Image: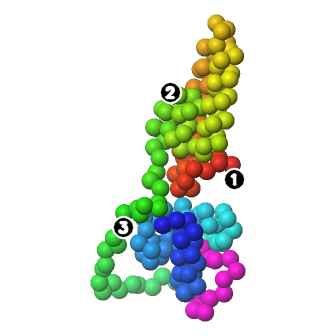
Amino acid sequence: MSYEDFQVEVIELGSRGVPLTVANVVAHMRTPPERVQRGLDKMARDGLLELEVDESEGFVVYRVRGLSTSAPLVRRREARPVRITRMTPVMYTQPSATMATPKSVTLAVVLAALVPGLGLAYAAPIRVVLAASLVVLVLGKMLGASLVFAPLFWLFAIGVSALFGGLYAVRYNQEGHRARLLS
């Protein structure tokens, strides 16, 4: 499920008066909790949702910004005993073809360290890979003749490339696609 489809589903749930908690969205959408949490947090960062903390229960309730619902929102002020008549197990679906599989941060660091610049291609946007590769090639060629600066440059290039490889893998896992580090 793409982020846009997730947004539509969450807003539709909110319009039906369903309290937007991670558990409710998981139950309605049959999506793993980690993915739901990331999606709701991203929607809040994008300004589509507002966060409210239910102090009596101690969990976060999201509210769709600008949505007026036809169904009344249910807010529990006191704990009431719940009678469970039948339990239905929640079945998690396998990721669809449109959902990106998470990138290994360890593998991203190793690839970026082995091939500075070009190793970023595992998780970074192609523009970043091309720019970093060009910088490494040009500076490597310029400093390659120096016995003092060449080893220092390559150590620096390996370290910086490995660091950015890991950062881009983490960013990829947060967004579900290749994305800039700063948005």
Residue shown at 59% from the left, 20% from the top: 155
Q: Is residue 110 visible?
A: yes
- Colouring scheme applied when the structure was drawn: rainbow
- Nearest the viewer among 124 and 35 is 124
Which numbered tag is attached to residue 114?
2
Residue 126 or residue 91, whichever sits in front: 126
Q: How crowded is mark 3: few (under 14 residues within 10 Å), some or many (20 or more)?
A: few
Residue segment shown in magenta: 59-76
Alpha-carbon span between mark 1 and mark 3 = 31 Å
- Residue type at mark 2? Leu
In magenta stretch: residue 104: no
Question: Residue 183, which numbered label?
Answer: 1
x 60%, y 20%: residue: 154
| Farthest-out residue, left | 86
Determine whether 84 is above or below 57 in the image. Answer: below
Q: Which amino acid does label 3 sit on?
A: Tyr
- Residue farthest to the top? 147
